[in-house]
Image: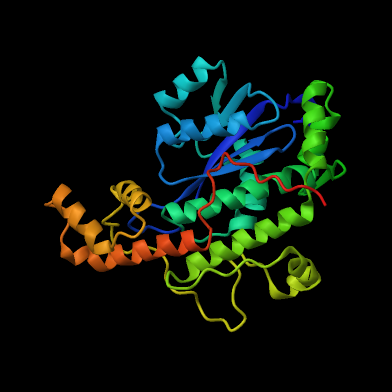
Amino acid sequence: MDWKDTEPRYLEIDLVAHCGGSVTGSFINSLVVTDVCSGWTKAIPLLAREQSLVVEGLEAISRGFPVSVRGIDLDNDSVFINETLFEYCADRGIEFTRSRAYRKNDQAWIEQKNGSVIRRFVGHERYSGPMAGQILAHLYGAMRLYVNHFQPSFQLLERTRDGSSVKKRYRKPATPCDRLLERDDVSEEVKRGLESSRARLDPISLLHTIREAQSALSAFNADDSASVPSSESQEHFLSRLPELWREGEVRPTHTSRDGRSAPRTWRSRPDPFEGVWCEILKWLQKHPDITASALLERLMRRYPARYSRRQLRTLQRRVRQWRRVVARQLVYASAEQSVMVEAD
């Protein structure tokens, strides 16, 4: 399919699970959307695989898309193929299509972005809980601006087969923003908005923000008791930039040079506070100095058959994590917040 023959309003959508293997517990998923024509990509973290959350995520993503959405293409995941999402598309006049079963190449555009963007910046580790979700949201905010405005990519022009060999020709590399600016069917108002947004951005500042978020995510995932790394200044980041490639990437997939395996980070049993953590957060926000013991007493009074003093140590660790993140200012805004960095 030639990208010039495709309207820049048809999106492919997928859900990337930040987990692996068969383990007990819920993990964060990333809702990823890409425009087939331009390659414009956005992602937000979802704390649970639930169809109403997917609809809310799509609504948040579509509001920040540079062009209106005409259609979406999905795989056969049950979180997508349901009446909730179908009615959402019908109410907004969005064309609803799906790929063939067991044919992942039907969604080649989004599958490519899952690897070249999401896995590239985040890695393959498991994440769970609101704190990791907040860090991911902050990372995705900076990543969206950097990838769509400053990271060029190839697009396939033609593919020919000669016997067993396949030859491919590509167009010159371009960013998703550049491709939209080249289109005649994109309005001048949208083009002016894109040019204005890119003029206000600094790619070095965005890379610095991405690096900090990756460091926080790596430290959060590597050891629950580890302290969150302090933020380095942008000047220090610039001085280290020529040598960063020698150290490897900060993302959690990077293997240490000494060959030691990372400690286990996934859950081996159900989270006892999975269904009430939102209530606990409200109590903590209203009374930041409340102790874990007092919180557990409240839970025991509200859910007498579910909680006992045996969960105190688990709750103490969870509360300690929350306070550490707040103290280090890692409680970031939601995925809707744009990380706009002014150019120097």
Task: Give the x, y percent position of residue 147.
Answer: 72, 47
Task: Give the x, y percent position of residue 118.
Answer: 61, 51
In front: 280, or 18? 280
| Residue at 20%, 53% in the rendered image | 298
Q: Farthest right residue?
A: 172
The image's colouring method is: rainbow
The tally of labels here is 0
| Residue at 56%, 63% in the rendered image | 216
In front: 168, or 338? 338
Task: Give the x, y percent position of residue 46.
Answer: 47, 44
Residue 321 position (above or below residue 35): below
Task: Work out whether residue 2 can be spotted.
Answer: no
On the image, which quarter does residue 320 sit in?
bottom left
For the N terminus, give its image quadrant: top right
Task: Give the x, y percent position of residue 246.
Answer: 74, 75
**Residue 342 falls left or right of residue 275:** right
| Residue at 79%, 42% in the rendered image | 200
In front: 57, or 17? 57
Task: Work out whether residue 247 can be spotted.
Answer: yes
Residue 15 position (above or below residue 183): below
Q: Farthest bottom residue?
A: 258
In front: 202, or 291? 291
